[in-house]
Image: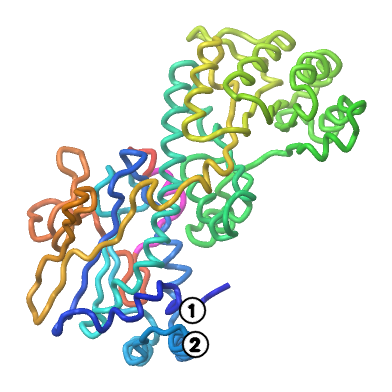
Amino acid sequence: MFTNLILNTDSYKASHFLQYPAGTQVVSSYIESRGGQFPQTLFFGLQAFIKEYLLKPVTTADIDEAEALFAAHGVPFFRQGWEQIVQQYGGFLPIEIQALPEGMVAPTGNALVQIRNTDPQAFWLTSYLETALLRAVWYPTTVATLSWQVKQSIRQSLENTCDNPVAELPFKLHDFGARGVSSHESAALGGMAHLVNFMGGDTVVALLAARKYYGADMAGFSIPAAEHSTITAWGRAGEADAYANMLQQFGQAGKLLAVVSDSYDIYHAVSEIWGRQLRAQVENSGATVVIRPDSGVPEDIVPEVLERLYAAFGGHVNSKGYKVLSDCVRVIQGDGVDVDSIGVILQRIQQAGFSTENVAFGMGGGLLQKVNRDTLRFAMKASAMQINGAWRDVYKQPVTDSGKHSKRGRLAVIRDAGVLKTIREDALSWESNLLRPVFRNGELLVDDGFDVIRTRSNQE
């Protein structure tokens, strides 16, 4: 919609070229999560930003548009600086970006990205890009982190209650969030970030983004599913016919179909319609019908639905002592689901004696929209500058909030006894710096595939 990179900033940034000390040549800044809701971050999304915004040159037309807008807006504009970028670099930005490998899980408080200008005359450019670059990192990283944290909770519950937890895990959290986010781009980035951890989602644009930016042929999968309108269209008296139609249309052997079953009375639907009237059709279809409750208190509803399905369709007790439904039925809970409620639901399922393999979750706004920059306290700060040939540390140290103290110097990230740690670059000895160059002067230096990022995230 808005493609002019010069205008992908905050207004006050336009005047900063006049605010640095005389002789400033290089400004080096970094991005980190300073803490927040989770102790780790799963870093993701920078490559998408680079491909979408930094591999396209700034043009004279962009400069003209920005100059006119900022003049009317009431702030200075550094036309000379942008013209130099067009004339000397063909419109590509003279910057270098270093970053941790995407998909890496890092403790909060570590540098994830480091950026500096490569042309001394473009010293003002580093911080000018803060708005766009920070936004490009904090949102997909926060969603990927939230999804990863849920994955750990589900993984632990599966390991406690399931005979084959590895096979069950990839489809246990489904992305229902496309309609609940603020923009199409947010759906793309957030949905794609979720797919680093799981393989189920209904956010179509996330599939396109993963293909465009990370070379994924097909990053996620879904199944035929009913909504209230397709069930209630048959009328209350025709509820059983609506369910039977789902079986007729999609109930092939080996397939899955999801049917929302609480448009009227979830307990009647489970025990009487599914469990009695349609039981033989379900069992003979060879398919798996995934029953979806969509209202009420999830930690109460899900165990009750499991009990009623077990009573109707039977099942078995696995080697860990937990009940597993017949293969023809499962449950998905998609209402009232967030990172906190999933833990409560899992606990109640286990207390009721059921294996976690019986249940999947769908998360909408709680996955893609119920986050902000402060969820993981993201910030981009200058940490070093070269002025008249000499490097100096740059930092903030507010006496009122030690949590906002920033790092000093050019930075490196190393593994110290297996744990990621941020140190000064000039303190490196034999260690490898995990902050690797990924972009320099218009060139993408690293192009990771989606499968590589998924594999990396599973190593933590």
Image position, residue 409 (x, y; %): 13, 62
Query: Residue, x 33% and y 43% (percent of image)?
Result: 36
Q: Quadrant of residue 427?
A: bottom left
Mark 1 falls on what kind of element? loop
| Rendered view: 44 above or below 243 | below
Q: Is residue 47 above or below residue 101?
A: below
Circles 2, 1 touching at the beta carbon (< 8 Å): yes
Location of mark 1 (residue): 4
Q: Disc 2 versus disc 1: distance between alpha carbons?
A: 8 Å
Kindly identify the residue that appears in the image at 60 percent across and 25 percent down.
Answer: 298
Could you tell which of marks 2 and 1 lies nearer the N-terminus? 1
Counting the numbered discs, the total is 2
The answer to if 380 sits in the magenta stretch is no
Q: Say few, some or many: other residues with alpha carbon within 10 Å of mark 2 (under 14 / 14 to 19 / 20 or more).
A: some
Residue 32 at x, y percent in the picture: 29, 54
- The residue that disc 2 covers is 65
